[in-house]
Image: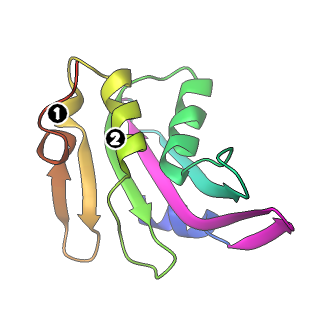
């Protein structure tokens, strides 16, 4: 997953109002396929996080169950999904979201679950 994310992580300026690729993410689906995504930052709220980009890629390919998520920040280290991405994953897998694994530290193999990061969903 880390290698796949690093392959697409390539920060670039697309226009005066848009940059992409500074953050990359991979999603491992229930069928063990890896889906990639990068962040797209815009001058307004129309951008998208790398995690949701990867999740949309997974959904576009007919899958809807997440096993694991890995995010690589611009400094090359792992990071946790933001609140919007967590909420999206909870809504996608509302009955089983607590078991989604979030890779927090690739080098040391540290994994937490989405249930640990998001223990009390609002619904």
Q: Is residue 81 left or right of residue 10?
A: left
Crowding near the residue tagged with mark 1, few <14, some 14–19, many ≥20 C-alpha atoms within 10 Å: some
Q: CA distance from mark 2 to mark 1?
A: 11 Å
Which of the 4 image quadrants contains residue 103? bottom left
Query: Which disc is residue 55 wearing?
Result: none
**Among all residues in the image, which is located at the extreme bottom?**
75
17 inside magenta stretch: yes
Which secondary structure lies at badge 1?
helix
Query: Which disc is residue 98 wearing?
Result: 1
Give the quarter of the figure containing the N terminus.
Answer: bottom left
Q: Is residue 113 left or right of residue 42?
A: left
Q: Is residue 37 left or right of residue 29?
A: right
* Residue 49 x, y percent position in the rendering: 54, 51
Query: Which disc is residue 86 wearing?
Result: 2
* Residue 85 x, y percent position in the rendering: 41, 42
Give the quarter of the figure containing the C terminus.
Answer: top left
Q: Residue at x 81, y 62 (%)?
A: 17
Q: Residue at x 12, y 46 (%)?
A: 116
Q: Residue at x 46, y 39 (%)?
A: 33
Q: Which residues are magenta?
A: 11-30
> Considering only vertical position in the picture, is 73 above or below 89?
below
């Amino acid at each position: 997953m880390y290698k796949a994310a690093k392959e697409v992580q390539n920060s670039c300026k697309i226009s005066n109002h848009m940059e992409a690729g500074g953050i990359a993410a991979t999603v491992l689906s229930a069928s063990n396929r890896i889906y990639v995504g990068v962040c797209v930052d815009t001058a307004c709220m129309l951008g998208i996080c790398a995690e949701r980009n990867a999740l949309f890629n997974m959904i576009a390919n007919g899958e809807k169950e997440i096993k694991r998520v890995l995010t690589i920040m611009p400094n090359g280290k792992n990071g946790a999904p933001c609140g919007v991405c967590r909420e999206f994953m909870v809504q996608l897998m509302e009955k089983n979201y607590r078991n989604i694994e979030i890779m927090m530290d690739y080098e040391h193999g540290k994994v937490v679950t989405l249930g640990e990061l998001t223990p009390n969903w609002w619904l």
